[in-house]
Amino acid sequence: MPRPISTLLASALLILAATASAQAGSSTQAGAAFGRGDFVKAARLLPPLAERGDRRAQAMLGFMYATGQGVPQAYDAAAYWYRRSAEQGDTTAQYLLGLMYDKGHGVPLDEVAAYTWLNLAAAGAPKRLRENYQRLRDAVASKMSRRQIAEGQWRALDWAATPRR
């Protein structure tokens, strides 16, 4: 049985914080602020980085909007930033975007889209996270028809086969 969403979001926060310090320059400052929970400072530093296409900054900003930390809670803004990061292949953003589609937070409730993003996240996740991502993907699949699962699998395959910048 999947863990509560709050536990999964806390795990995502740790993943985002751990990978944020690998960035250079102002993104290091933004990642450090995010990692230590200084979301007000992170909210000042992350938007320019996210606008320039930094996928980690986009994922962190999405998380802040989803949880209302350092910025007003806004699921539509969270989904926007998660999608921008997820489309660049960030597995944490793919995972969190999948959760948003599963719950209909900031996006229309869409089990096929949820399954697609969770499937991509599970396929690309580091080994330590893969089982959790698969478990959540499978929980979404348990609510779907075989046709919907097949559609989600095809969408994920099509997305994975499309060259990214």
Image (cartoon, rainbow, N blue to C red):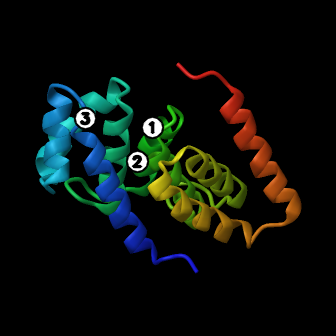
The residue that mark 2 highlights is 77
Residue 122 visible to the viewer: yes
| Front of the two marks 3 and 1 | 3
The residue that mark 1 highlights is 85
Relative to 127, is 116 on the left or the right? right
Q: Residue at x 72, y 55 (%)?
A: 112
Q: Residue at x 53, y 56 (%)?
A: 130
Q: Position of residue 142 (x, y in %)?
A: 74, 72
Q: Residue at x 46, y 43 (%)?
A: 80
State which quadrant residue 56 falls in.
Answer: top left
| Front of the two marks 1 and 2 | 1
Q: How many marks?
A: 3
Task: State which quarter of the image contains the N terminus.
Answer: bottom right
Q: Earlier in the sequence, mark 2 or mark 3?
A: 3
- Indicate the secondary structure of the residue bearing disc 1: helix
Q: Amino acid at mark 3?
A: Ala
Pick the residue in front: 69 or 122. Answer: 122
Q: Amino acid at mark 2?
A: Ala
- Indicate the secondary structure of the residue bearing disc 3: loop
Kindly report the distance in space between the C-alpha atoms of the residues bearing marks 2 and 3.
25 Å
Residue located farthest toward the bottom when viewing the structure as drawn: 1
The crowd level at tag 1 (other Cα within 10 Å; few <14, some 14-19, many 20+) is many
The residue that mark 3 highlights is 22
